[in-house]
């Protein structure tokens, strides 16, 4: 009989501990901010199908006793999610139609997007992938060779985008292995990571991650996802500074959300705060018609008014492009090109 060998796992890093602590119940979240279900017009959902996930750092930035706190409203499962929502979809961007290989989306000619992980440190209630079956959609170890072969066989692809979930939910070792496999494809010149974890768990910007991005031959770009200036805490700014020092290009994309950031003064303050932290505002997305998130919608007429105000308040390089992603279009559609 073979001897029994205890499997010794490496200790979890601080960011991993924070990710594990992120799963909360609705009652836990309300207790933390000193509120009750009755403080919200439509109440709250005690056991949502899309579970709550709010890391301790992000939780610490919320104001106690304020049911209108813009950070809280992004993560609390309010009763509006359960109201009838005609014209909403579980796959609002029709991503199933763009799956070119296991874990690969090909929406645009020169870019390939890898669903690198199904996990995300923070669950935003407006997430357009909140209903995604990641078991079927994400990149797996067994499917990685096919995914990379597809990229290697198409010289038109010069940029690989890691998305999810959140690619920074992967360990540094797993991320390094994936980057190394992409680096050997000669026509790929740019690596882009889309991440909200940098805002939710700034400790995720570890020395190993910084070294990985500083050392790759690829042009490294991180697109953060921040919607409000209060998300750019001192710790987040320090993490962003570490990435900038490593030569990473930092962009930000936001979502225009009712009651969260749907006024020009709030957006302008956020853009200035991003720039002070070394991040350039990139896109401001109109919400996608995902089932359960209609209460976040801001209509196009209101968005046009905000764009006019922002152009008057900010220099052009700080005005994010207001866009909507329309299934089947060759690129994101700017606000001016949308029909009223």
Image (cartoon, grey):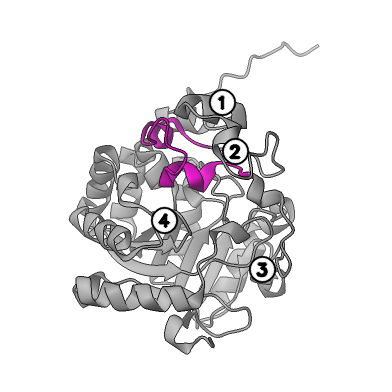
Q: Residues within 10 Å of mark 1 (few under 14, many from 20)?
A: few
The residue pinned by badge 3 equals 92
Task: Identify the magenta region.
Answer: 54-78
Left or right: 310 in relation to 127: left
Measured Cα–Cα span from mark 4 to mark 2: 18 Å
Marked residue nearer the N-terminal end (4 or 3):
3
Q: Earlier in the sequence, mark 2 or mark 3?
A: 2
Mark 2 and mark 3: span between their CA atoms? 21 Å
Earlier-in-chain disc, 1 versus 2: 1
Of residues 218 and 233, the one nearer the viewer is 233
| Mark toward the viewer: 4 or 2 | 2
Spot occupied by residue 87 in the image (x, y as percentages of width and height): 72, 70
How many C-alpha atoms fall within 10 Å of the one at disc 4: few (<14), some, or many (≥20)?
many
Viewer-side label of 1, 4:
1
Left or right placement of residue 172 versus residue 79 in this view? left
Reading the image, the residue beneath label 4 is: 225
Pointer 1 and pointer 2: residues touching (CB < 8 Å)? yes
Residue at the (30%, 60%) spot, across then down: 250
Tag shown at residue 28:
1
Q: Which mark is residue 52?
A: 2
In the rendered image, which quarter is residue 307 located in? bottom left
Task: Report helix, strand or loop for mark 3.
Answer: loop
4 and 2 marks in contact (CB < 8 Å): no
The CA distance from mark 1 to mark 2 is 10 Å
Cβ atoms under marks 4 and 3 closer than 8 Å: no
Question: Helix, strand or loop at disc 1?
Answer: helix
């Amino acid at each position: 009989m073979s001897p029994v060998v205890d499997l010794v796992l490496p200790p979890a890093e601080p960011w991993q501990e924070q990710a594990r602590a992120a799963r909360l119940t609705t009652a836990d979240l309300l207790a933390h901010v000193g509120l009750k279900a009755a403080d919200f017009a439509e109440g709250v959902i005690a056991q949502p199908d899309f579970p709550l996930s709010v890391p301790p750092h992000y939780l610490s930035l919320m104001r106690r006793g304020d049911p209108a706190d813009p950070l809280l409203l992004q993560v609390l499962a309010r009763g509006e999610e359960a109201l009838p929502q005609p014209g909403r979809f579980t796959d609002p961007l029709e991503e199933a139609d763009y799956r070119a290989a296991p874990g690969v989306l090909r929406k645009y000619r020169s870019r390939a997007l890898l669903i690198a992980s199904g996990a995300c440190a923070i669950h935003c209630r407006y997430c357009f992938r909140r209903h995604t079956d990641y078991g079927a959609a994400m990149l797996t170890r067994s499917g990685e060779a096919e995914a990379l072969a597809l990229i290697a066989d198409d010289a038109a692809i010069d940029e690989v985008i890691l998305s999810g979930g959140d690619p920074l939910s992967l360990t540094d070792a797993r991320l390094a292995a994936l980057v190394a496999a992409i680096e050997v494809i000669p026509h790929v010149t740019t690596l882009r990571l889309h991440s909200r974890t940098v805002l939710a768990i700034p400790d995720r910007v570890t020395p190993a991650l910084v070294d990985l991005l500083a050392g790759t031959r690829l042009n490294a770009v991180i697109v953060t996802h921040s919607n409000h200036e209060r998300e750019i805490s001192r710790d987040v700014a320090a993490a962003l500074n570490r990435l900038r020092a490593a030569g990473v290009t930092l962009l930000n994309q936001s979502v225009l959300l009712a009651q969260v950031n749907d006024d020009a003064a709030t957006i302008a303050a956020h853009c200035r705060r991003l720039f002070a932290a070394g991040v350039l505002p990139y896109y401001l997305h109109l919400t996608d018609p995902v089932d359960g998130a209609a209460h976040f919608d801001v209509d196009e007429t209101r968005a046009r008014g905000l764009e006019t105000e922002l152009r008057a308040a900010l220099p052009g390089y700080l005005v994010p492009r207001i866009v909507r992603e329309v299934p089947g279009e060759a690129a994101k559609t700017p606000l001016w090109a949308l029909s009223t």
